[in-house]
Image: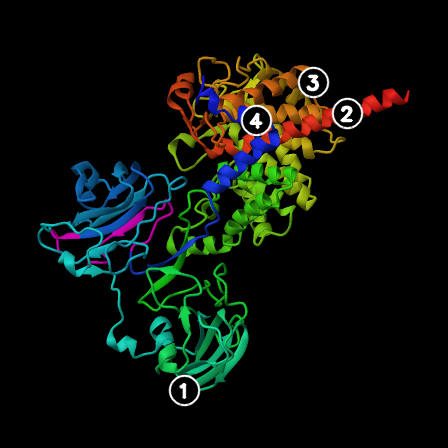
Amino acid sequence: MRYFHENEAIAGKVYDSIPDILTTLAQRYIGDHPKHSFLFRAYHQGGFRRLGDYRYDLSLNEKCVEAHAGQYVYVWGKLWSEQNTTLNTGLNCYSPVTIYVNGEEVFKSELIQELFPERRTQIPISVNYGWNDVLLCFVKTEVGFGGIYGTASFKNFPLHFLTPGADRQGQEGWLYSEPVDEPVLSLPRDGMTEEETGLSWYPRRGWTDEEQSMGSFARIFGKEKPAVAYAWSKLDVTLPGSTPIILKGRHDGALTLYVDGTEVYSAGSSGNFHVELPRRYGSSDLVAKGEIQTLGVSWGFTLEDAERSGSKGWRLKSPHPVAGCSDPWLYTGVFASGDEPSHADIVRTDTVFDDGAQGVYWRVDLPDTHVRPYLENTHYGKWNYPLGVTLLGLLQTGQELGRDDYIQYVRQHIELSTSFDRYGLWDREGYGAAGINNQLSAIDSLDDCGSFGSTLLAAMEFGDIRGGRDTADRIAGYITDEQERLEDGAFYRVRGSGEMRQETMWCDDLYMSTPFLMRYGQLTGDATYWDDAINQFLMFRKYLYLPEQQIMSHVYDFVRGRATGIPWGRGNGWVLFSLTELLSILPHDHVKRSELLQFYRDLSEGYLALQGENGLWHQVLNRPDSYEETSCTSMFIYAYARGIREGWLEQPEPYLEAVRQGWHGMTRLSIDYKGNIYGVCRGSGYSFTALYYRDDLGWNLNDTHGIGIVLLAGIELYKMNQKLREAHIDSSVTAAQR
């Protein structure tokens, strides 16, 4: 099978140079996924909360207490899509509902859905490139009002909806209308102002005149108790020169101002301030610390702009852009006096500040509106298991080729997740579902933590990663104490994000667990983690090994009491790859090493017999009529090349030939000259029939299940070639010396 014209194969363009192939692959990936950070958005806490499955609880009884049966309320949001596609959404009805997408009706509830709110309905919606209006029209009944709606697959597509209309552009969440007696004649569309729709929309978006007069700190945090609060902005000097910058304003309550950590003003009571600063071109942190001691009075500060202050060439800007709010100040608090964080520690966006209770983060000067980070990249900054192996491949490629930029790209991607790990847990607790780290903050399976966690540990060998050790410890705790196990200690899946995962053991889970356990045991010096990893291989062998073919079944189904008997290619690749990782760390004198080494040899022999005529292995290993699959081929190349290099194979010659044929085939059939990778099976379910894997489980272009392992295969082949060449030179020198 050929995925592209033979003239476009990478092998012919770089004359089979492994470093050039690896560089092309790495740079294609990095170029497609640049280092963009999280996007911060304003979120109104008076809107709808997301649930643990990332759908929104659009309960309207509490929002519209004056509504009566038969009235209508519209719930309006919008979604961005990078392409024309179909998104799978899920709905539970508390009451009748009609759903419109881009002005077209796509769903209308039926009696069975309305009477049984516990029933979840899958609703595919077609979306266009760009912004897409999503409008739900609910009808109030005597027994319910509203529903639950959102993504049908939060692990892969944790959709968050944005506030539509021109008035709150960029905020996260939905608007809901006032109750009306009849459906509107013209549906609202994005770009309209709220007034243009003819409806009143909630939650409210502005302060009352009375609230405006209270002062910024008081209207945001209240004034019922003595407290300390902070505001943070950037003083951006846009014109160089020698004239000073003048900050003028008024404050109610005590106020201290800091510029880049240096105190420039302090007063213990209300008053006016006039501060002259040296004109330093560029941006500086401007922090205002306010304190209220007298209850019920105004509390806050105002700062005149450059024109009114009499010194031009400066402005205030937000220390971090927040979509949905144009104000240049961020606010956090409140803290008890004497227990507040220092002004130096406050200038961070990855920290939940200790207020002596649940913790606090940043807010903006709008009613009940908080700042929250959201991951809107498809890859960079995302935490999931295929990206774990992708980044491991990039990391080792950078190390082997001397490309520190690759190493730093990987470390910065990982640190974006780990530095916000504590925040993500806090966000999920407070808001129901975090806008970042959707899997890391809601670990309920090995998929969520082990693969990426192993890469985290590998990346930490190159230097400290902010939050890395705490995240690794949390993953170890989950695997050891929370992951479901059989009585013999073997991992299996009782629950998960889909029904298909119930009461099953997947050979994939050896990769989702054992490389992390081996690296974590190495980090901590605690051999019990190694013992656990070893036990997993022995137990999985008991349930999934097919001795007559010396390969592994993909899944054992405990409901049916048997293995599926289907040797899915990538699942088997994970097994041999993970066993290779284990043997690379396990001491040579370990009591179980010989047994595990023999298992490696048995599996290697079984897979060797199933290599395809073009050098690639097949999607179903023992079905040559299934497509040639790139990711499993890469893993077998990796494991064989590592085994040859380490001397694990008693007769290495046939494996050496298999490695050569596999790489030769991939670089001519699966990898084009631009670094695109073809023939990588998408994420799988499981079945007792090979036809599911062969016919229904297709491949994706540049699927992250394959990118990293192709890089790792190339690295191991490169190392093997160097080792064999050095061994040949050494033997030649020895012979010559005789």
Query: Relative to residue 258, is residue 156 depicted above or below?
Result: above
Alpha-carbon span between mark 1 and mark 2: 80 Å
Query: Quick check: marks 4 and 3 in contact, CB under 8 Å?
Result: no
- Amino acid tagged 1: Asn
Q: Earlier in the sequence, mark 2 or mark 3?
A: 3
Position of residue 180 in the picture relative to residue 553 (left or right):
left
Label 1 belongs to which residue? 272
Question: In 3D space, how far apart are the residues under numbered discs 3 and 1 (Cα atoms)?
Answer: 83 Å
Residue type indicated by callout 4: Met
Instruction: Rate crowding at label 4 as few (under 14), some (14 to 19) or many (20 or more) other CA atoms within 10 Å.
Output: many
Q: Is residue 67 visible?
A: no
Instruction: Provide the residue designation for mark 2.
Output: 727
Earlier along the polypeptide chain: callout 3 or callout 1? 1
* Left or right for 333, reference 531: left
User: Quick one: label 1, few (<14), some, or many (20+) residues within 10 Å?
Assistant: some
Q: Earlier in the sequence, mark 4 or mark 3?
A: 4
Which quadrant does the N terminus fall into? Answer: top left
Say which quadrant the C terminus sits in.
top right
Q: Position of residue 220 (x, y in %)?
A: 35, 71
Q: CA distance from mark 4 to mark 3?
A: 17 Å
Judged by depth in the image, the label closer to the viewer, 2 or 3, is 2
Q: Magenta stretch: give its range.
A: 48-73
Q: Which residue is mark 3?
A: 652
- Residue type at tag 2: Ala
Q: Nearer the viewer, mark 1 or mark 2?
A: 2
Residue 566 in percent (x, y) is at 47, 18
Q: Which residue is mark 4?
A: 635
Q: Earlier in the sequence, mark 4 or mark 1?
A: 1
Q: Residue at x 54, y 70 (%)?
A: 344
